[in-house]
Image (cartoon, helix red, strand yellow):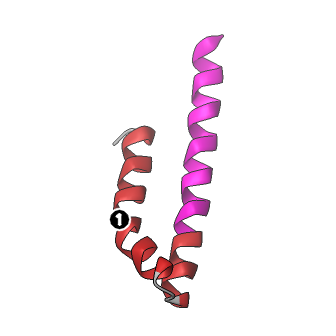
Amino acid sequence: MDLLEKMEQLLQDCREDYNKAKGGNKAAGTRVRKVMQDVKNVAQEIRKEMLVSRD
């Protein structure tokens, strides 16, 4: 699985918890924040990959 697919999968898996968090579920909000940190890290890896391929 490439990095972009990994990011897409993380976001898809997070959708249900996101909806629960919007409804006031604090535990779901914590899970969403954790996934968003993972998405941020994957995005950083993608940026690094693109910089290397640019050279």
In the image, residue 44 above or below residue 48: below
Residue 26, image x, y percentages:
55, 89
Find numbered disc 1 in the image and state the secondary structure of the residue it sits on: helix
User: Which residue is drawn at the image coordinates 65% and 22% (left, top)?
Assistant: 51
User: Which residue is drawn at the image coordinates 52% and 66% (left, top)?
Assistant: 35
Residue nearer the viewer, 40 or 15: 15
Judging by the rendered image, the residue that carries numbered circle 1 is 13
User: Which residue is drawn at the image coordinates 56% and 35% (left, top)?
Assistant: 46
> Where does the magenta region start and end?
34-55
Taking the image as shown, residue 16 lies to the left or right of residue 51, namely left
Residue 8, image x, y percentages:
38, 48
Task: Reply yes or no: does residue 39 show up in magenta.
Answer: yes
Q: Residue furthest front?
A: 23
Q: Quadrant of residue 48?
A: top right
Task: Reply yes or no: does residue 43 show up in magenta.
Answer: yes
Residue 5, image x, y percentages:
36, 43
Taking the image as shown, residue 21 lies to the left or right of residue 49, namely left
Q: Quadrant of residue 55?
A: top right
Q: Amino acid at mark 1?
A: Asp
Residue nearer the viewer, 23 or 9: 23
Residue 13, image x, y percentages:
35, 65
Q: Which quadrant: the N terminus? A: top left
Q: What secondary structure is the magenta-colored segment mainly?
A: helix
In the image, residue 27 above or below residue 30: below
Neighbour tally class for label 1: few under 14, some 14-19, many 20 plus, Cα within 10 Å: few
